[in-house]
Image (cartoon, coloured by chain):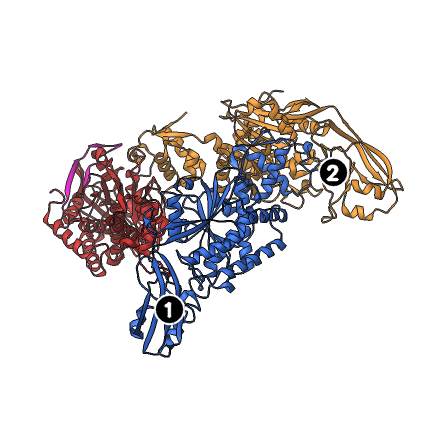
Chain colours: A red, B blue, C orange
Amino acid sequence: MTAGTAGTAGTAGAAGAAARSGTAGAGAAGDEGREMHALVERLYPLCRSITGDGVRRTLDIVGESVPLRVREVPTGTPVLDWTVPKEWNVRDAYVKDASGRRVVDFAASNLHVVGYSVPVSATMTLAELRPHLHTLPEQPGLVPYRTSYYAETWGFCLAENTLAALPEGRYEVRIDATLADGHLTYGEHVVPGRTSEEVLVSCHVCHPSLANDNLAGIAVATRLARRLAGTDPHYTYRFLFAPGTIGAITWLALNRERAGLIRHGLVLACAGDRGHLTYKRSRRGDAAVDRAAAHVLRASGRPHEIVDFSPYGYDERQFCSPGFDLPVGCLTRTPYAGYPEYHTSADDPGFVTPEAMTDTLEACWEITRVLEGDRRHLNLSPYGEPQLGRRGLYGSLGGRSDTKQAQMAMLWVLNLSGGDHGLLDIAERSGLPFHVVADAARDLRAAGLLKELA
Amino acid sequence: MTAGTAGTAGTAGAAGAAARSGTAGAGAAGDEGREMHALVERLYPLCRSITGDGVRRTLDIVGESVPLRVREVPTGTPVLDWTVPKEWNVRDAYVKDASGRRVVDFAASNLHVVGYSVPVSATMTLAELRPHLHTLPEQPGLVPYRTSYYAETWGFCLAENTLAALPEGRYEVRIDATLADGHLTYGEHVVPGRTSEEVLVSCHVCHPSLANDNLAGIAVATRLARRLAGTDPHYTYRFLFAPGTIGAITWLALNRERAGLIRHGLVLACAGDRGHLTYKRSRRGDAAVDRAAAHVLRASGRPHEIVDFSPYGYDERQFCSPGFDLPVGCLTRTPYAGYPEYHTSADDPGFVTPEAMTDTLEACWEITRVLEGDRRHLNLSPYGEPQLGRRGLYGSLGGRSDTKQAQMAMLWVLNLSGGDHGLLDIAERSGLPFHVVADAARDLRAAGLLKELA
Amino acid sequence: MTAGTAGTAGTAGAAGAAARSGTAGAGAAGDEGREMHALVERLYPLCRSITGDGVRRTLDIVGESVPLRVREVPTGTPVLDWTVPKEWNVRDAYVKDASGRRVVDFAASNLHVVGYSVPVSATMTLAELRPHLHTLPEQPGLVPYRTSYYAETWGFCLAENTLAALPEGRYEVRIDATLADGHLTYGEHVVPGRTSEEVLVSCHVCHPSLANDNLAGIAVATRLARRLAGTDPHYTYRFLFAPGTIGAITWLALNRERAGLIRHGLVLACAGDRGHLTYKRSRRGDAAVDRAAAHVLRASGRPHEIVDFSPYGYDERQFCSPGFDLPVGCLTRTPYAGYPEYHTSADDPGFVTPEAMTDTLEACWEITRVLEGDRRHLNLSPYGEPQLGRRGLYGSLGGRSDTKQAQMAMLWVLNLSGGDHGLLDIAERSGLPFHVVADAARDLRAAGLLKELA
C-alpha cells in the first residue's frame, strides 16, 4: 500500500486538522493519549527481535492506523559494513525442573529467552546451565533483557530470586527456535509534502516486551503521522519503523540517494515514561531541528534537558555517522539506561502513561510546526520603521507603558528580516514563542510589508 | 546659525577644556549638574508634542547654550514610509463642572490634554465624557501621559481620584487647539571634527511636562556638546534634538547620505533618575560604541546594566532599522517603562537630580574619550620585549612583587599592537581602564616604540 | 657535548621507558621526587644571577643528569632590542658594625646582596647606609630578593628585624664584586625526535637561593628530559636553561630560524610548592599546547587553574612577543607573587616538596603524551557504524546498560574522524581521557577501520 492513499490516514488527518489548528486541545490529547496507550498494550506481548514474525505482526498492527510500505530484505544482503543476518523465530522455550515444572517459561514473558538464541534441547545440571542464565542481582525481582545477535549462543533471563530458589539437580532445557535464512523486515509511512525535501521520523521496532523502549515511540510516531496527514505540509514526512541498528543500516544502504533529501530528522525512543523530555542534538549540533527542538522545549516552559550528540544511543548513531552526517536528533523522555526499569521486565505498559505520550507527541508536533514555518523574509520597507498604525497593525493610542507581544513580534520580524534571519532566529533572539513570530510575519506579508524568500 | 560659529559655544568650549583635561573635577561637575537641572526646570512647563510651538520654544532655549540649526519641514512632506503630520498647538483646554469650576485644566498641567487632540467645544453628561477620560486606576493620584498622533480623537488625562470625585451631571468640555498644516521642527548642533566621520547624539524633544523623559536627556546632550566644543575632536559630533519617531524618520529621510557617515551614535533618554545607568546595544551588538559603552560602565565600577538591542524603545528603533543599521546604542538610567513614574505627572523635576545627570554626562564623556582615542598601532620592536628601562619607561629596581598598572599597560600595548587590535581591545583584554592604556600608548609612541596606524 | 649522545641520558632513558609505559608508577615517581629534591638542595646555595659563575656551576650540575650544550655569549653582543650586559660575580660582601661583627653577610645567604651591585668599600653612618638597605616591613623576619641589572647601584637586603636592631653609628660596608666584560651563559639539552619540529621547555636559571623560583622548575625540566630520552618521540624536545628575560632574548636572537620550528612550548617555573597547578595560556590562547594542558589538568581531576595569557610573568613574555608569537604556555604551581614566600628567604628547599615536583612532572609528561599522540585520522568505513563485533572490538552480548569507556572511545573516534578532528578534539568533545581515545584509535587502525592522516 502506498503511503497517503489509504482511507484511514486520510480520514484521521482531516479530523485531526479540524480538531487542532495550531496545537491540539486537551480533549483531543486525551483521546490521542488513550489510543497510544491502547496500541502499546496491544503490541506488548509480541516477541519482536531484529528479524522475524514479531516485527511483521507489529507492522501489521501499526498499519491499521497508518498505511505502511513493508520491505523484506533477504538474509545475506550486504548492507554498508554489515550483512543482513539470519531470521530468528521462537515457538517455545523453557527450563523444566526434575518434576517437569516450567521454572522459566517463554510463554510467560518473551524476555526469558536471550534474543537470537540458537535452538537447544538438552538435560543438564544446574551447574552446567548456570553460565546460560542471566539475572540482575541488584534488582532481584526483575527479568533482564539480553540479546546475542552476532555471536551464536543461547541463554535464559530470569529474576535473581527465581534463580536463588532453584535446587541443584537436573533440568530440561529447550529453546524451540529457528535461526535460518529469511528476511529483515521494516515498514515506512510517507506523508507527502509539497516538496521532495524530507523530514525523517524513525523509531526502533526490535525490542520484545518493553513498553517505553520502544512501544511508546512507535505509538507516538504513529499518532504524529496521523496528525500530519492532510495538512499539506511543505516537507515530505517519512516515518521509519525498523529494527535498531541493523534496520537503520539496511534502510540507509538501500536509500543512499534518498538520505540526501533528508533536511531534518528525529529518532523517537523512550517516549512514554513520567520523566521530562530530553532532546539530544544531532552530530552537527546546530541543525535546524536542533534549534527547533530547543526552542519548542524552552518556549513551552516544560522542564526539559538538551544534551549534546554522542555516538551512542539509538539510530541517530547511524544517521549521524560521518559518511551521512544527517541532521537527525533524538527525542526521548528519560534517556536510555537512565531509569532503573530500563531493559527489564519492569518496563511494562504500566510504566508508560497516556499523558506522557501525549506530551511527547505535542513536542513533536510543535517541532514540525517550527520546521514547517521557519521561513526567511525580506522587509520591503527597511528604512526606518514602516507606519504600522496606518495599516491597522498598531494600537493607535500611544503613550501606554504596556506593549503587546504581537506588536513586539512585528517589530522584531521587520527589524531582522534582511534576508539573513529566519523566523526561528527571530523567535530565539526576541525571546518570543515561534507561533507569535510566525503570526506576525503572516500579518506583515498580508500588509505588503514583507516578502517571503524562496 | 551654523554650528561651531557661535560665540557661546566657543567660550564654553574653551572654559570646559581648561577645567577638564581628561575627566571633569567634582566641582565642575557640581556646576554642570546645577546648570542641567535648571534647564530641566525651565523647559518643564512647555507644551511639547511632535510638532508645534512647544518644540520651537524648547529649541530656542537649548540654543542659548549651544547654537542650533533649526529645520522646519512642511506638513505633508513624505518621509520614508511616513508623512509629516499636521502641526498641533493648544491655547487652552478644560472640563468645567455645572458650577463653572475647571475640574480638569490644561493651564495646571499640559499632561491633562491627550496629545494631538482635535478641537472640541461641547456640553455633555459625565457618561458621555467618560470614554474621553484617561486615568491610572492603580496610581490614583497621578495624571497619565497619552497621545493619539495618527488617529484623530480628543481626550483628557486626569487622576483617578479626581475622576472618582466628579458628580454626575453636565460638563462643559473645551479644547482650544489647532490641528492644521504647518511644520515639524527639529534642531541640530554640530561640533566639527578633524574628519567628516560623525558621532550622532540624539534625544527626543516631543514629550510635554515629563522631566526624565526627556528633559534630562536634552540637558545632558546640551552639556556634552559644550564639553566637546573646542576639543578639536577626530570625529564630527552631531547633536539631534528632534521629536521621537517622526522626527528621527524625518531626519533620516532628509539626510540619507549623511547617515552613511555615522560611525558611532548614542540615543539619550531617561538620563536623570536615581537608578543606575543602562546601555542598550545597537542592532549590530558589537559596534565600537557598544564596546566603548560597556568598557566605560564596567571599568568605572558603577553599578550598571547592559542589555541587547530590541526594536522597541527610543529612536535607536529608527537608526537601527535594517535599511540603515547604524551603530547607534541607547544610554538611559532606568529604561522606559521601568519606573512607576514613567509617563505620569510624577515624572517631574523633582524626580531627576543634578547628581544623576552629571553621572550620565560623565559616562557619555568617557564614551567619547574611548571613541576618540581608540586607535590601532604597530609595535616597532616586536621581537621580544623592548628594553623599557633603558628608555626610562620601567622601574629600575627589579624583583619587587608589585607591578604598576602603567607598566602593565605598556606591556599589553606592545604585546597586542600587531595592527589587528585597537586600544579598546587591549583595555578589554588586559582588564585595564582605557585611559591607562591610552596613556601607555602615548608614552610608547613618544619613545619611538609604537607607530599609530591610519 | 651534543644532546642525545651522552651515556647518561641513554641509560636513564632506557630505564625510564621500561619503568613507565604510559604513566609513571608511584614507586618510580617517589624516586624521581627524591632525586628532584636532592637537585634543588644541591643547587640552592649557589649565587646565580643573569650572568656569572653561579649560572655556570648550575649548568655543570644539571649536566650531570642530562648532557648540556653550553653557550657563552660575550658582553656587548646585540640581542634583539637589548645588549648582553657585563658579567657579574661576587666573592664576598658584608656590613660590619663598629665592633667588626658582620651584621649582614653574603656568606650566610646570597640574597643579602642586591643582584648586580657594583663594588663598594666604604665606612658610613647608618643614616648614609639606609637608602641602600632593603627590607620587607610586613614580613619582618624575611630577607627580600632584589636586583638592579641595568641601573648601576649597590645595596643589601636584610630582615626588617635585623635592621631595627642596628644601633646608630658607623658601619663598614663592602661588596667584593666584579662587574666587567665577560659572558652570558645558557645551556640547552636536546632529545632528538623523528621530525625537526620542536617542543620547547624553558626554565630560568638566574635566581640565587630561591627554591621554588626556580630550582624546582630546573629539577622538573631535567627529570622530564630524562623521561623523554629513548622514547623516540615525534617531536624534537629542546630544553633551555637560561637566565630570565635577557637569556630568553639572547636565545631568540641567536635562534631566529629555529624559533620557527617550535610547534609547542612550556615555560616551567614555581614548580614545587604545595599549591595546585596553574597553566597560563599562550598569547594565541588556543594553541595545541593550551588545549593539551587544559585537557590533562581537567581529565586528571586535579584541582587546578587555567588563566589567560598576560604579557607579564616568566619568559613566555619573550616567546609570545608579537614578532615571534610562539605557542608557548607557562606551567607553574602557585604563580609568581601569589605566595607570601615569593622572592624572599622563605622560598627555601623546605618550601618545595618531592610530591609537588613529581605532580608537576607528571602533568608535563602527560602533556607531552597528548602532543605526541594527537593525530588526525580518516574513518575508512564512514557510512553507518562499522560492525565492531565482527572484528572482536565489541562485547557480543548486547542489551546490558553499562557501556565500556573503551567502546565509547571507539565510537567517538569513528564518528569524528572525518579528517577535521584530531584525537585531542575527540577527547575533549567526548569527555574521555586522551589516552583512552588514543588507545581506541590504535585498535581501530589495527583493525583497518582507521587511517592516520599525515
Residue A422, disc: none
Whole-angstrom CA distance, mark 2 to mark 1, is 81 Å
- The answer to the question of whether label 2 and label 1 lie on touching residues, with beta carbons closer than 8 A, is no
The secondary element bearing badge 2 is classed as helix
Q: Which image quadrant is residue A161 in? A: bottom left
Answer few, some or many: residues within 10 Å of disc 2's Cα (few below 14, many 20 plus, some between 14 and 19). Answer: many
Toward the viewer: C306 or A434?
A: A434
Image coords of residue A133 (percent x, y): 29, 47
Q: Which amino acid does label 2 sit on?
A: Leu
Query: Is residue A79 visible to us here?
Result: yes
In the rendered image, residue A77 lying in the magenta stretch gets the answer yes
**Hey, which residue is sitting farthest right in the picture?**
C99
Residue A337 in view of the camera? no
Give the x, y percent position of residue A260.
24, 35
Whether residue B196 sits left or right of residue A401 in the image: it is: right
Indicate which label's residue lies in the foreground, 2 or 1: 1
Q: Mark 1 points at which residue?
A: B135
The residue under the point 52% across, 29% down is C17
Q: In this orientation, which residue lies closer to the viewer: C90 or A454?
A: A454
At mark 1, the secondary structure is loop
Dot 1 falls on which chain? B
Q: In the image, A10: left or right of B36?
A: left
The reply, left or right, for residue B403 in relation to residue B238 is right
Q: Which residue lies furthest to the left in this view?
A: A7
| The residue stretch that appears in magenta | A67-89
Q: Where is residue A277 in the image (x, y as percent from the top left)?
A: 31, 52
* Residue type highlighted by circle 1: Thr
Work out whether residue B78 or residue B439 is closer to the camera in this orientation and state it. B78
Q: Residue C111 carries which label?
A: 2
Question: Local crowd at mark 1 within 10 Å, few (<14), some, or many (≥20)?
Answer: many
Compared to residue A110, the image places residue C114 above or below, namely above
**x, y percent for residue A421:** 33, 43
